[in-house]
Image (cartoon, grey):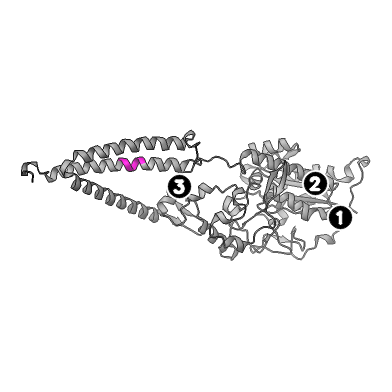
Amino acid sequence: MGSPSHRPTMRSVYEHAAHILISLYLVQAAIAVILLGIYKTPVYDRGLLSTRGGIAVLIGVVALVAAGWLLIRRSVASGSSFGRAFGLGLTANFLSGIAALLLLEATIRLVAKGSQDQILIGSVIVRPSWPELRIRSRSFFAGLAHWDDRDTSYFVYDRELGWTVGPNRKSKNGLYFSSIEGIRSGRPNVRMADQSPGFRVALIGDSNAFSFEVPFEQSWGYQLQQLLGDDVQVLNFGVDGYGIDQTYLRFQRDVRPWNPQVVLIGFIAHDLKRTMAVYPFVSFEWPGYLVKPRFAMENGEPTLLNVPLPTPEEIFNSNEIQSLPFIEYDLGYGSAEWYWRFDHGPLLLRYLTSTVPRWSVADPQVSEEASIALNSALLTRLVKSVERTGAVPLLVALSPSNTLMREAVARAGVAVMDGTKCLLDVPANLRQMPSGTHYTGLANQAIARCTAPVVDLALPRNRDPAKGSLRPH
């Protein structure tokens, strides 16, 4: 046995333990940098080191080697007190780490504001997990929740279009009615086919074509009808939430049988993003809109992938988001992205992954180029389909354009009227509803006044007879 003078004092044991503890913290910090790099990068192959996340991983590995070397050096320096010093350092490291995590988790849960729609921590919205998305949407369909006044009594599930206007419906808030044929109307029990107008104009598109959030008398379609005269019937086939693809399919199935002479197509920039979605409740967190048709470019042509669509129950019964059909084609899905959702993990981790978004590389199925190619092809197909029926297509952009819209329209080679210019005489604070998403009745009136002369000019009564009559027969 060593003499008492060579035995380590408790002070030296504590000093060595403190050095080991600091070294352990450095090792953990290096591991955290590596994990951050892996989390941030979407590339997990040989291209990893060419990304910013890969560089973070490399820095973390170098730091881990240095911290590991320092830990070994500190351990060797502890000499005969190694066992006690290392045990004390490791115990302190473990207990302090657990205490810090528990304290942070408790703090996060205390400040979190939960609701049926989202979890809010400060200004950060925690990204929903797959179980939460399912519960939220199932509650909506059960009538327990509402989303911007949409409800299942008016917009109904459709195995070809995803959802559409139900026939002869009244919304629970009394704002919307539909005809027996499933077209927006001013009152219930209306049969649009009973009217015998000289001309028909079909209005198709998204919520702005539908004129969401305002009553029928303040809608674009109704006010356009008043300006065009009694011999013109304006049929509003707009549906809230539609993308360019659904607008095209709605025309093919529901509008063509009416033989309109003019087809007015209203759309916004976001409609082109919707084209790249399969499950809007995943892509955009719209709980009432579960699934929609999805086209993809094959051999240079848009090809429909997923019709007939899965039923709501089939979707709700999926235990994992990865099992949903064609989920890889969804704009809001990335397989690696969903691995970091921590469906059943601590709220702290969910908060951190929501606060620090991943660097993403666009999947080829939903890249900007794929979006431009598909939307331009669908716009071209929509316009040609309208023209083949003998009708005149008129496209109206109801939002400021962005790169995607400009590129897709340019590649499609179609003429588009800038509907936002119709609003220049409307005070800015009176153009949109409080939601900031849809136009007011005053704005719809301005758009109707602006588009009425163009529609009127396109009617057969005002066109060159040499081009042939397009009167209904």
Asked whether the beta carbons under mark 1 and mark 3 sit within 8 Å of each other, the answer is: no
Residue 197 circle label: 1
Q: Mark 1 packing: few (<14 Cα in 10 Å), some, or many (20+)?
A: few
- Name the residue that disc number 2 marks: 385
Percent x, y of residue 78: 18, 41
Percent x, y of residue 24: 28, 43
Q: Nearer the viewer, mark 1 or mark 2?
A: 2
Residue 181 circle label: none
Asked whether the beta carbons under mark 3 and mark 2 sit within 8 Å of each other, the answer is: no
Q: Main secondary structure of the magenta part?
A: helix
**Residue at 50% across, 40% down:** 45
Of residues 456 and 272, which is closer to you in this image? 272
Instruction: For mark 3, give the secondary structure.
Output: helix
As shown in the figure, which amino acid type bears the numbered disc 2? Answer: Ser
- Name the residue that disc number 3 marks: 353
Q: Which residues are magenta?
A: 26-30
Relative side of 23 to 129, left or right: left
